[in-house]
Image (cartoon, rainbow, N blue to C red):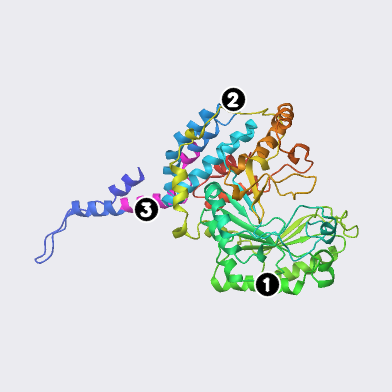
Amino acid sequence: MRLQNLLRGIVGSASGPVIPGQVAFDPEARYQDRAAYVKRKVENRFKRYFLSHPDPELHAILAAIDEKIAPATALEDILLALDHGKEKLYKSLRIKTAPLAAKSLTIKILNLFLSKYHFVTRGTNLLSSPYGIIVDPMNACQLACPGCVHSNRSKELKLFDWGPGVLSEAMFADFMRRYGPYAIEAEFCNYGEPLLNRNTPKLIRLAKTYLARTMLSTNMGVKHFNAEAYVNSGLDYMTVAIDGATQSVYEKFRRKGDIETVFKNVRSLIDTKKKIGKRTPLVSWQFLAFEHNQHEIDDAIKMARSLGVDQFVVATPFDVSPDDPSILASKQPPRTVVFRPDGSRGMLENWNPFPAEIQAEPIEQEFAASWRERLVASSDAGNPDAHTCHYLYKNIVMDGTGRILPCCGAPQPHVDLVFGNAQSGADLFNSEKYRLARLSFANPTEYKVKQASTLTAAPYCANCEWSHKAQIDTEHLKNYFVVVGSDVFSPASVAMLSSW
């Protein structure tokens, strides 16, 4: 109606007398020119609005699949729904993203729905892939912090089964070819110091070519730190662990650490970000609050501000007193001090930093594959009301030697947490120990029968007393889809994809 009114108001009046040498005034031509101009203006305004707002149809497509995720739905029907929704989902995502990126997002989202189905039905043999990847680029660490596998006491008493190992580019490339297309996030840290592996920036860059969010945690105390390599790697987020403002306090927990080396490396990283003109990685100073260092929190905050990090986090450590009774956790409440509120905007710019390097072959291959054709047996769902461990359905962990672990726990002589090896070429996420571990929660009675009939030692999961929340979970999913863009996923869509 508004367009029609505009068009009505621009019709010219009757033409006057024609002056020799002058083109006669044509009211109809003027009307058509003005109408075309207004039409283009309205269309461009609509286009700008549409491109800056989520497509309502996308949420409807996601909702149609999500409503089928229930214990009463047969696995085959879920797979058919994924196949049916794939092309619709891709076409909707293609409006806002490049074709290959849209295909990558499509298979990540469909895998999430299948993971959710296996989780709510307590399946034991999964057709889905882990969406969270945790790897140790280096098993070793130059520090000896109490409570860690690298502490002096841990090594003397051989409390952990944790030997040396350096993750090779070739091993990680093979691992990512299998799990990268479905990965939402890759974390490059567990018990080792990732900066000790000089190829870690290359591993990060590879993960980014699968459009995975990337982060690592570091003590930042290495002698040779290549700041430019990390800034250019595509790393999204870096946690720097510094538990003090002075050397005498810092080294009480960070044994063998040199705080001046840490500060020098942080300065180098921040200066390099400014020089190159990048906001990423977002740098977060983590301060584990103990009784011996809590008096330095305010000084540490001042130092963090002067260094130029994005935020400062006071965190509660786990209990390390069995290793060193003199190191006690503080009662300081956790808190976060944000210095750069716009720091997270850098991750919006960093979702697809290497568009020319996206892993086209494995992404195209997984996109073309039928979900229904993956079904080779009937569903093995357990009790949907049974308590279970989120790690077993959501994340996979690999150390520097290629050992596959179900969670971030460290193997011990009496704690069997090695579920496979990346070099075996087997289906790592469905090894016999993985299936038994899931079964121990889903159907304890059947688990006892099956475990007794195998030669495999009982996985520690059956008697686990640790937290059963996955490292890469709900908040990480939310952050990922928000970073893809608020013009792609609405808040309702983000909640649907992440809240399970």
Specify start and end residues of the magenta stretch as a single range.
38-60
Q: Position of residue 334 (x, y in %)?
A: 78, 55
* Label 1 secondary element: helix
**Label 3: which residue?**
44
Number of the label disc, if any, that sits on residue 265: 1
Question: How packed is label 1: few (under 14 Cα within 10 Å), some, or many (20 or more)?
Answer: many
Q: Position of residue 474 (x, y in %)?
A: 64, 45
Confirm whether the magenta stretch covers residue 54.
yes
**Left or right of 347, for residue 196:** right
Query: Which residue is drawn at the image coordinates 58% and 43% (left, top)?
Result: 426
Q: Nearer the viewer, residue 26 or 85?
A: 85
The answer to whether 295 is drawn above or below residue 73 in the figure is below
Confirm whether the magenta stretch covers residue 399.
no
Label 1 amino acid? Answer: Asn
Q: CA distance from mark 3 to mark 1?
A: 48 Å
Q: CA distance from mark 2 to mark 3?
A: 47 Å
* Label 3 secondary element: helix
Q: Position of residue 315 (x, y in %)?
A: 77, 56
Question: How packed is label 3: few (under 14 Cα within 10 Å), some, or many (20 or more)?
Answer: few
Query: Which residue is drawn at the image coordinates 72% and 45% (left, top)?
Result: 417
The answer to whether 267 is drawn above or below residue 107 in the figure is below
Q: Position of residue 342 (x, y in %)?
A: 60, 61
Magenta stretch: helix, strand or loop mostly: helix
Label 3 amino acid? Answer: Asn
* Label 2 secondary element: loop
**Label 2: which residue?**
72
The answer to whether 399 is drawn above or below residue 230 in the figure is above
Query: Which residue is drawn at the image coordinates 67% and 54% (left, top)?
Result: 399
- Residue 478 in sight here: no
Label 2 amino acid? Answer: Ala
Circle 3 or circle 1, nearest the eye: 1
